[in-house]
Image (cartoon, helix red, strand yellow):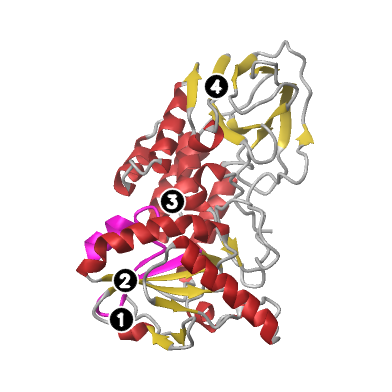
Amino acid sequence: MKKIILIFATLLTIVLMACKSEPKTTSAQVVSNTPQTEEAPQTEAPQPSPQSEPVVENNTPNNGNLQLSGTIGDATAGQALQVVTIPFDNTQPMLVAQTKILSNGAYKISWNNPKKGVYSLKLGPQQQLMFVLDGSEKNIKFDIAKNGFRSLDVKVEGSDLNTRYFNIMKGIINKTAKPSDLRKTILNEKNALLASLVALQTQKDPSSLELHQTIQKRLAQVPNLDKTKYSNAYAAYIASMERQASQAVIKVGAMAPDLAYKNPEGKIMKLSDLRGKLVLLDFWASWCGPCRRANPHVVEIYNKYKIKGFTVYSVSLDGDKHGSTNPNVIKMHKDRWVAAIKKDGLVWPNHVSDLKSWNSEASAKYGVTSIPATFLIGRDGRIKAINPRNNLEEVVKANL
């Protein structure tokens, strides 16, 4: 059975998360599991599930040979704090250590014989901090500021490895890391496990295939690392990426299939009518949390480059996923779509939908199985880039 990479990526919600079609999902995606409304399709499990408790591997007494301590600004006295494994395959996370928060937000955790791997410090289902161990650590301190789980405002002592990891990820969150520099950072990272973790979290485009192959070869040579959970699972992900690239419906350089659907006022809007402009074809939906979180950045790029001939053609996958033709149901979904356009400030005029959810003809034409999904179409009508997200501005500027 094909193994699917399971990476917990709440630290990068805008970059990594996606809403996926239940019947159309065929390939591995490094995404996060987010609560969805009843209209959202089911997602493929991408992480240690917060809905179920991890399996207990061991309950070590406070005489372990790794001491993990610090303070948490969001914690309250008596809260349970756990450390769970984050494997790259589809095995269940393991609970390796736990404690309770003290009255001042302090904590101290011990466990015996820590192994090389990726772990998560877990304060409830929504607050988790990933970190990496190389197996040699004795004392690590993570002081996590208020809201630090999301912003990565973490002071680290005793682990240069995790200092590097948090610095890399903060650069992505704060948008100070250029995509080209990030790739160099990943390739130059001396710890292969850290490099693989960052690559899996940030490099999802098929153009990153060679980078993943390079890192996986290094990971496979790391001694005393569980190969099944890490390097072999990484290899399976790469194989899946290769198959996905070879079977892609839309390829860079191909002519973009035309689309013609109604806007909220009932007017037919054709994608081909935008020929001569640089167009971001954006598949999204009002119920898709990752799409909504990505929208502000798309708005920012649109406002910055529209004067130079850049625009957006948005295709909404709103609608009843069961294919209801009840006028009241259709109106309900249309109203949600229109409200989301207004709330998110999507000021470009090109908004269309057939209100058929995952039965949309447009998504079938472009082979879309998860959203947000984007295609950058050149002035000549040819595909210039597929899913430019981390590097959207860079790719737009290069094609104007």
Q: Is any part of residue 331 visible from this angle? A: yes
Q: Are marks 1 and 2 in contact (CB under 8 Å)?
A: yes
Residue bearing mark 2: 311
Q: Is any part of residue 137 visible from this angle? A: no
Q: Is residue 300 above or below residue 74?
A: below
Q: Secondary structure at mark 2?
A: strand
**Which mark is on residue 203?**
3
Task: Return the disc, 4 or 2, that comes first in the chain's sequence.
Answer: 4
Residue found at x 57% / y 34%: 130
Q: Position of residue 170 (x, y in %)?
A: 42, 36
Q: Are marks 2 and 3 in contact (CB under 8 Å)?
A: no
Q: Is residue 220 or residue 254 the one in the foreground?
A: 254
Task: Return the disc, 3 or 1, that comes first in the chain's sequence.
Answer: 3
Alpha-carbon distance for marks 2 and 3? 25 Å
Please give the range of residues in magenta. 372-400
Task: Return the disc, 4 or 1, that comes first in the chain's sequence.
Answer: 4
Picture quadrant of residue 94? top right
Picture quadrant of residue 64? top right
Q: Residues within 10 Å of mark 3 (few under 14, many from 20)?
A: many
* Type of the residue with mark 1: Leu
Q: Secondary structure at mark 4?
A: strand
**Which mark is on residue 76?**
none
Task: Return the disc, 1 or 2, that comes first in the chain's sequence.
Answer: 1
Alpha-carbon distance for marks 4 and 1? 51 Å
Alpha-carbon distance for marks 1 and 2? 8 Å
In the rendered image, which quarter contains the C terminus? bottom left
Camera-side mark, 3 or 4: 4
Q: Are marks 4 and 1 in contact (CB under 8 Å)?
A: no
Q: Residues within 10 Å of mark 1 (few under 14, many from 20)?
A: many
* Type of the residue with mark 2: Thr
Q: Is residue 277 or residue 6 the one in the foreground?
A: 277
Camera-side mark, 4 or 2: 2
